[in-house]
Image (cartoon, rainbow, N blue to C red):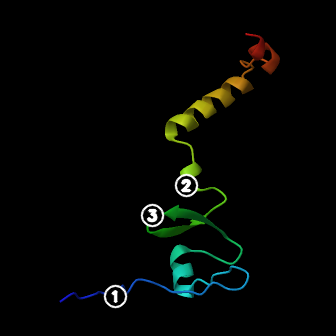
Amino acid sequence: MVVKTVRTDENIARVGQRREVVIQREMLETLNIREGDFVAFRKQVTGVLIKPKRRVDPDDILSPEESAKIAKARREMRAGMGIPLAQLLAV
């Protein structure tokens, strides 16, 4: 005998005429999504992943090493240690 289990963590929504999907309030609150926010969609083997997309996404933030290099370059530029772009391109 095969017993099928029902997922209790699924939320079901209907796609509207303009391809809009209404996400339940509890899910929006859990993900901290508000009206006007952006979401990113990613196709996966089992379906579609929808995740909040912030103006500054944690995936787009520089590593500590990259931040240190930029800080060093800014200090050098303020100290007059930079060279003009034309000179750099001529090298």
Q: Which residue is mark 1?
A: 6
**In x, y percent, where is residue 9?**
40, 83
The percent coordinates of residue 79 (x first, y second) are 72, 22
Q: Where on the picture, by quarter, is residue 28?
A: bottom right
Label ID, residue 85: none
Residue type highlighted by circle 1:
Val
Residue at position x 48%, y 85% in the image: 11
Q: Earlier in the sequence, mark 2 or mark 3?
A: 3
x%, y% of residue 52? 58, 67
Q: Residues within 10 Å of mark 3 (few under 14, many from 20)?
A: few
Tell me if residue 32 comes above or below residue 23 in the rendering. above
Q: Marks 3 and 1: CB-CB under 8 Å?
A: no
Give the number of callouts. 3
Seen in the picture, residue 47 relative to 7 is either above or below; the reply is above
Given the current orientation, which residue lies at the most extreme front position?
A: 1
From the image, tell me which residue sits under label 3: 45
User: What element does badge 1 sit on?
Assistant: loop
List x then y, in percent, for residue 83.
76, 17
Side of 54 relative to 18 (left or right) = left
Residue 34 position by quadrant:
bottom right
The residue located at (45%, 64%) in the rendering is 45
- Residue placed at 71% from the left, 18% from the top? 81
Upstream in the sequence, badge 3 or badge 1? 1
Q: CA distance from mark 2 to mark 3?
A: 24 Å
Q: Quadrant of the C terminus?
A: top right
Residue marked by disc 2: 58
Instruction: Residue at 51% x, 67% y: name it.
Output: 49
Front residue (pair 70, 24): 24
- Kind of residue indicated by mark 2: Pro
Q: Tell me the mark number nearer the camera, choosing from 2 and 3.
A: 3
Q: Residues within 10 Å of mark 1 (few under 14, many from 20)?
A: few
Question: Do callouts 1 and 2 mark residues in contact (Cβ within 8 Å)?
Answer: no
